Amino acid sequence: MQQENLNLDIFEKAVYSLKDALNEYAKDKENVYVRDSCIKRFEYCYDLSTKIIKRFLSISSENIDDIKSMDFQNIIRLAYTKKILKNSWDKWWAYRDNRNKTSHGYDEHNAINIVDELELFYSEIVFLLQVLKNKNEP
């Protein structure tokens, strides 16, 4: 049985839109509008990446119910074991923590700290995107 391919178009566009925002932010780190754009794009990319990780694991698993019943921490650990992620739970916990901070109100100090860590997240999702694109190839 051939494995189903993932549609990566939306995820790929989101990944590169985050990079565009990060490039603009690098030009002027005092620009709060661009910083806010980076954060919104991070939120979107984070949410998409977690969904696509779970989707990949579901379609590549012998038992989809095992994946459905896993908590987020074990999903990330399994994805790392399957080599679709550069980093395991320790880094993804930090990404998740940052995502939670952005959804519970605006705090400038948190915003600055989160944006300063986005290059690492960006490299993670570029890795994920490339691995998944390679797995889609025949």
Image (cartoon, rainbow, N blue to C red):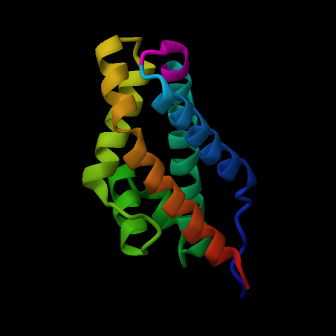
Task: Specify whether 12 is left or right of 112.
Answer: right
- Segment tinted magenta in the rendering: 30-35
What is the number of callouts on the image? Answer: 0
Check residue 96 for magenta coloring. no
Where residue 12 sits: x, y (%)?
67, 52
Where residue 99 sits: x, y (%)?
41, 32
Dividing the image into 4 quarters, which one contains the N terminus? bottom right
Residue drawn where x is 40% and y is 16% of the image: 104
Task: Specify whether 109 is left or right of 8.
Answer: left
**In the foreground, 92 or 74:** 92
Q: Is residue 64 above or below residue 115?
A: below
Magenta: main secondary structure equals: helix
Where residue 28 sits: x, y (%)?
47, 22
Residue drawn where x is 24% and y is 52% of the image: 90
**In the foreground, 136 or 116:** 116
Residue drawn where x is 60% and y is 47% of the image: 15
Q: Which residue is farthest left?
A: 90
**In the foreground, 29 or 107:** 29
Where residue 19 sits: x, y (%)?
56, 42
Dividing the image into 4 quarters, which one contains the C terminus? bottom right
Task: Specify whether 90 is left or right of 71.
Answer: left
Q: Is residue 108 above or below residue 52?
A: above
Residue drawn where x is 35% and y is 11% of the image: 107
Question: Residue 115 falls in which quadrant of the image?
Answer: top left
Question: Residue 116 falls in which quadrant of the image?
Answer: top left
Q: Which residue is farthest front?
A: 27
**In the foreground, 96 or 107:** 107
